[in-house]
Image: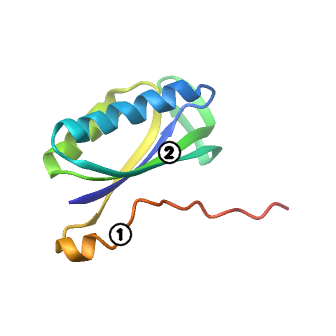
Amino acid sequence: MLYELIAIVRPGNLAEVKEIARTAGSLVLQSGGTIRGITNWGVSSLPKRTRKHQALYHEGHYFVMRYDASSKTQDDVRKTLGLDPRMIKFSSVKLGSGTLESLSKIGGQIPWQSRETS
């Protein structure tokens, strides 16, 4: 099945973001899954202030990963990210479970919509 993971890591250290993405990617690859793409969206404001692990955050470092894996692997990725104190929030969405032909049309490119500045 095809999944898209959107993760928000505490800002300030790009090495932490890379390590978390590498950990999630390793779980997928070790279970026989495929990573279609990882996109770094950089630091951006959170929709609302969030308290996590006794700290208050107004912004976070976003990254997105698309991957093909089993539902058990997806659960393992969610459990691992949920236990990491560097994570602020994450969400995993199933993009499809249809035929291989229909899923092959979904690419690994994950565009970021540019925001207008006022």
The C terminus sits in image quarter: bottom right
Image spot of residue 66 (x, y percent): 36, 54
Residue at 26% of width from left, 60% of height from top? 2
Judged by depth in the image, the label closer to the viewer, 2 or 1, is 1
Question: What's the mark number on residue 106?
Answer: 1
User: Which amino acid does the dot numbered 2 rest on?
Assistant: Phe
Q: Nearer the viewer, residue 9 or 106?
A: 106
Q: Residues within 10 Å of mark 2 (few under 14, many from 20)?
A: many
Q: Is residue 80 above or below residue 118?
A: above
Image spot of residue 71 (x, y percent): 16, 51
**Element carrying mark 2:** strand
User: Which amino acid does the dot numbered 1 rest on?
Assistant: Ile
**Residue 37 in sight from this viewpoint:** yes
Q: Which residue is mark 2?
A: 63
Q: Is residue 59 above or below residue 102?
A: above
Residue 105 shown left or right of residue 15 in the figure:
left
Q: Is residue 88 above or below residue 37?
A: above
Image spot of residue 20 (x, y percent): 41, 31
Distance of label 2 from label 1 (alpha carbons)? 18 Å
Residue at 53% of width from left, 25% of height from top? 15
Residue at 35% of width from left, 69% of height from top? 106
Q: Residues within 10 Å of mark 1 (few under 14, many from 20)?
A: few
